[in-house]
Amino acid sequence: MRIRAVRQKELPVLRGIERAAGRRFRDVGMPQIADDEPLPLDVLGGYQQAGRAWVATDVTDQPVGYLIADFVDGNFHIEQVSVHPAVAGRGIGRQLITHLADRAMAGGIPALTLTTFAHVPWNAPYYARCGFQTLGERDLTPGLRAIRRREAAHGLDRWPRVCMRRTLCPPADRTPP
């Protein structure tokens, strides 16, 4: 498995990966999530142009998973990580997260954050196994609170959601790599 930057021509592939991965939500009684449209191409393109979009590729260099990240309150925030179900369970999501963690540590960024569904097995329980800890309400940063408000406005609060953090290194005054 190779992790590399997303190429512009691959942006539609990312949407296909997310749609395929999202179908699993139907199996846990969340059809609205399964049917939710992936981010538009122009938004994905913004991540690609900012250097905050990576793919995991197969032996033919075709994307099978991807991760996009924001910079929120001094940390990298995982906006989306998706792996095609045909290759799920092979550690690809973990490799993408590790790639982001390595970039963060190289840039002195202290942590990774994300928001996710609390009780979906491949969401919060999975991220806990990847070293993330659930944050209490009083531990949320202003940026995480703003993300949660946007998610609630999008209807995601129909199911329990949590913010999680994986501490990497001490805080530093640096810009993201």
Image: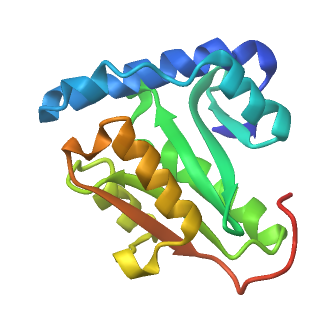
Residue 125 placement (x, y as % from top left):
29, 60
Of 94 and 70, which appears nearest the observer?
70
Drawn side of residue 55 relative to residue 144, left or right: right
Of 111 and 46, which appears nearest the observer?
46
Q: Residue at 75% x, 24% y: name it.
A: 45
Which of the image's four quarters has the C terminus? bottom right
Can residue 174 be seen here? The reply is: yes
- Residue 158's image quarter? top left
Residue 4 placement (x, y as % from top left):
76, 38
Can residue 61 be seen here? The reply is: no
| Image coloring type | rainbow
Q: Residue at 37% x, 67% y: name it.
A: 128
Which of the image's four quarters has the N terminus? top right
- In the rendered image of this protein, does residue 109 appear above or below residue 116? below
- Residue 105's image quarter? bottom right
- Residue 52's image quarter? top right
Q: Residue at 12% x, 32% y: name it.
A: 29
Drawn side of residue 93 relative to residue 85, left or right: right
Residue 72 placement (x, y as % from top left):
66, 60
Residue at the limit of the structure toward the bottom, as seen here: 170
Q: Residue at 35% x, 27% y: name it.
A: 22
Drawn side of residue 94 relative to residue 116, left or right: right
